[in-house]
Image (cartoon, rainbow, N blue to C red):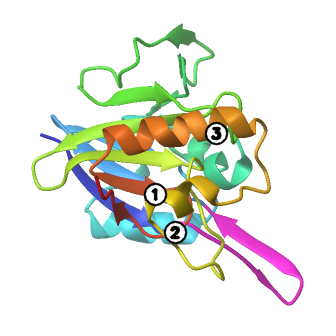
Amino acid sequence: MAEIKILVKGYAREENGIEFASSTATLIKDGGLNIIVDSGMNREMLLVNLVKENLSIKDIDFVVLTHTHLDHCLLAGIFGNAKVLDNSNIFSFDGKIDEHDGKVPNTEIEIIRTPGHDQFHCSVLVRTESQGVVVIAGDVFWWADEEKQKIDRQSLFEHKDPYVKDPKALQKSREKVLGLADYIIPGHGEMFKVNK
């Protein structure tokens, strides 16, 4: 079964009128493959934490992007040996674009469509031995650093997303993710257990 490690805990804050943000960057190890979900923007943190896992940028096989907001995808290009996946396609650094079947190739890791925050948003569903089903949800759920992360169902549905593109689609995506996950890794904030 797959193993998950958070390399960078996502953050979003303002300091002295300047915005700082980087998404959660998650490492999945599965069947000898190394997969990053959302590379984020903080290059130094990402590279330092990869080294702690005894990995380099050359060791990454796939990068999955939940969506293409730059705080989630700016660093995807540093993984030159990887293929990059979004909600429907596989992109190669030789210019090839192919479709995927809703899974990271050669794994059982699912890529599920979760529009709302962005119309092409997706989440990544990973089955693990220790935590059950973990959904790396990108910005289906996210919190700025100064916000209290409330994780009861009502608060999760009522939580405002100032960047939402389609509020109704986002609510459906939140319902979908909450129905599937034992744990959720948000785009910015702490991983949390789903109370069923």
Provide the residue span drawn in magenta. Answer: 10-22
Mark 3 and mark 1 in contact? Answer it, CB < 8 Å.
Answer: no
- What residue would you read off at disc 3? 170
In the image, is 59 to the left or to the right of 31? Answer: right
In the image, is 124 to the left or to the right of 133? Answer: right
User: Amino acid under label 2?
Assistant: Gly
Taking depth in this image into account, of 144 and 7 the one nearest to the observer is 144
Mark 2 and mark 3 in contact? Answer it, CB < 8 Å.
Answer: no
Q: Residue at x 41, y 34 (%)?
A: 62
Q: What secondary structure predominates along the stretch shown in magenta?
A: strand
Looking at the rendered image, the quarter that the N terminus falls into is top left
In the image, is 193 to the left or to the right of 159? Answer: left
Mark 1, other Cα within 10 Å: few <14 / some 14–19 / many ≥20: some
Q: Nearer the viewer, mark 1 or mark 2?
A: 1
Mark 2, other Cα within 10 Å: few <14 / some 14–19 / many ≥20: many
For residue 143, the mark is none
Residue 37: image location, x then y, percent: 45, 45
- Whether residue 67 is visible to the viewer of this picture, yes or no, is no
In the image, is 149 to the left or to the right of 50? Answer: right
- What residue would you read off at disc 1? 153
Give the Cα separation between the discs numbered 1 and 2. 16 Å
Taking depth in this image into account, of 63 and 148 the one nearest to the observer is 148
- What residue would you read off at disc 2? 189
